[in-house]
Image: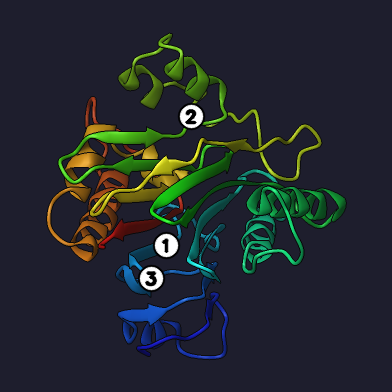
Amino acid sequence: MPGSCDITWKRWNGCDKEACLRSVSTAGTPVVMYGTDLDDPLTIACPVGQAVVYSHRSIAAHKPNEDALGVFDWGDGKLLLAVADGVGGLPGGAAAARRAIETLRKAPAGEHEDPVGYLVDKANDSIHQDISMGATTLSAVLIQNKRFTSYHAGDSATLVVGQRGRIKFQSVCHSPVGVAQAHGELSEHAALFHPQRHLLCNMLGDETFWVERSACCELATFDTIVIASDGLWDNFFCDEIVEIVCQGSLVQAGRRLAHSARQRMLTAEDNVPSKPDDLSFVLYRRQT
């Protein structure tokens, strides 16, 4: 299924899931995934770079994947990348994640000072008003003119790494533990193993929701953006992720992240993070 195509995958899509997912290695935008179990990361051809996406349910859960992700070409040189994670323990989390991603599919009509913020607010209102939906975290990045802006709510997060491994940007998780770590009150090790790491203080669908927007930052050639649900961040130390994404091609990095995360989830070792969960990520690397 090469070339530019609109791909919307879900668990029940009228075809043999395994055959469908294994037959695809490269696609174009837009891409929307929800309730998806990919065997291997998928490469996405983008106007000025390359994206690699992956999504799979928790290896320990007998329920559908509650994550969703999207890669959208908004035109005029704008590319939007997003990952949402339906909040566990609440009914309708998967539907909320899907609603958040679908709302970001196209740039809003008319003039908006902050089009992404406008759509995220719109998604939150829609989720909050729908009694059948729960809540979701969200991390999104808008890329335009060799610059990027990050938007997030909850503990889906974004990391931007330079070609030589320097961390250029890292979002702060909206959780008591995440905030404490950012303020230097907890070490990374203590935060990863904290018994209340799963607690959130911000999410779409909550009446106290707010979206954090970063400054508009430079994106240099060969910088790598990592956007992921907590299924990634809860299973690695940050320097491990940096090391993986800085070695080899983007698709190689995606495969190593997916494989290593699943191995971590399967095997608990002392002082090594391990938390079975749905895992979804979008990697992007600017190439020119």
Looking at marks 2 and 3 on the same chain, the residue that comes earlier in the sequence is marked by: 3
- The residue labelled by disc 1 is 56
Picture coordinates of residue 130, whole percent (x, y): 85, 56
Query: Between 143 and 191, which is closer to the camera in this rendering?
Result: 143
Q: Amino acid at mark 3?
A: Leu
Residue lying at 55% horizontally and 63% vertically, measured from the top left: 64
Side of 148 where 134 appears, left or right: right
- The residue labelled by disc 3 is 38
- Mark 2 touching mark 3, by CB under 8 A? no
**Which of pointers 2 and 3 indicates the residue nearer the eye?**
2
Q: Is residue 121 above or below residue 32?
A: above
- Mark 3 touching mark 1, by CB under 8 A? yes
Residue 91 appears in the figure: no
Residue 172 has which mark?
A: 2
Quarter of the image with the N terminus is bottom left
Residue lying at 28% horizontally and 42% vertically, measured from the top left: 161
**How crowded is the residue under tag 3: few (<14 C-alpha within 10 Å), some, or many (20+)?**
many
Q: Amino acid at mark 1?
A: His
Picture coordinates of residue 86, whole percent (x, y): 61, 51
Residue lying at 12% horizontally and 58% vertically, measured from the top left: 248
Q: CA distance from mark 1 to mark 2?
A: 24 Å
Residue 34 has which mark?
A: none
Looking at marks 1 and 2 on the same chain, the residue that comes earlier in the sequence is marked by: 1
**How crowded is the residue under tag 2: few (<14 C-alpha within 10 Å), some, or many (20+)?**
many
Picture coordinates of residue 51, whole percent (x, y): 35, 65
Residue 112 appears in the figure: yes
| Mark 3 element type | loop
Q: Amino acid at mark 2?
A: Val
Side of 134 where 149 appears, left or right: left
